[in-house]
């Protein structure tokens, strides 16, 4: 049984930084894509940053140059470094994994962590 547990969210002022962590427990398929997704109030969930097992990285245009996705395989942990945060980055951030990186194929989800920029 695979579990994803996020941490690191919180309240931050505009221009501030946060680092989110997603710890993986259980036997996640090593070929799975992993990524960070967010859902703002009243909006649909969107991809923020994704890391395919071939090493390809995707960032949504609004976070390019500000966010960095990375992983530490020795700790079974996925990270999202976020800098120059602005109000539009507010939302619940979810860690997700699936056979493909497209949002519709993500079938393992964490519980989410709230990020509030205010």
Image: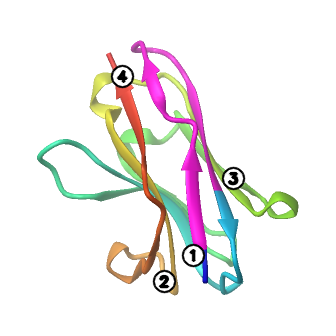
Whether pointer 1 and pointer 4 mark residues with C-beta atoms closer than 8 Å, the reply is no
Whether pointer 4 and pointer 2 mark residues with C-beta atoms closer than 8 Å, the reply is no
Distance Cα–Cα, label 1 vs label 4: 28 Å
What residue do we see at 42% from left, 12% from top?
13
Distance Cα–Cα, label 2 vs label 1: 6 Å
Q: Which residue is mark 4?
A: 117
Q: Select label 3 or label 4 by which is in front.
A: 4
Q: Earlier in the sequence, mark 1 or mark 4?
A: 1
Whether pointer 2 and pointer 1 mark residues with C-beta atoms closer than 8 Å, the reply is yes
Q: Residues within 10 Å of mark 1 (few under 14, many from 20)?
A: many
Q: Which residue is mark 1?
A: 33
Q: Which residue is mark 3?
A: 70
Asked if the stretch drawn in magenta spans residue 12, the answer is yes
Q: Which residues are magenta?
A: 3-22
Would you place residue 39 above or below residue 63 in this image? below
Judged left or right of residue 64, residue 22 is right
Asked if the stretch drawn in magenta spans residue 16, the answer is yes
Q: Earlier in the sequence, mark 2 or mark 3?
A: 3
Q: Earlier in the sequence, mark 4 or mark 2?
A: 2
Distance Cα–Cα, label 2 vs label 3: 18 Å
Q: Position of residue 85 (x, y in %)?
A: 43, 24
Looking at the rendered image, the quarter that the N terminus falls into is bottom right
The front one of 97 and 53 is 97
Would you place residue 14 above or below residue 70 in this image? above
Distance Cα–Cα, label 4 vs label 2: 30 Å
Would you place residue 36 above or below residue 68 in this image? below
Q: Which residue is mark 2?
A: 100
Q: Residues within 10 Å of mark 2 (few under 14, many from 20)?
A: some
């Amino acid at each position: 049984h695979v579990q994803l547990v996020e941490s690191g969210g919180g309240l931050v002022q505009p221009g501030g930084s946060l680092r989110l962590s997603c710890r993986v427990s259980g036997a996640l398929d090593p070929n799975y894509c992993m990524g960070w997704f967010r859902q703002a109030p009243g909006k649909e969930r969107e991809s923020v940053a994704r890391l395919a097992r071939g090493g390809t990285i995707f960032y949504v245009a609004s976070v390019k140059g500000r966010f960095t996705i990375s992983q530490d395989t020795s700790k079974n942990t996925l990270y999202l470094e976020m800098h120059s945060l602005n109000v539009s980055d507010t939302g619940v951030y979810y860690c997700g994994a699936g056979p493909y990186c497209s949002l519709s194929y993500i079938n393992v989800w964490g519980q989410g962590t709230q990020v509030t920029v205010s």
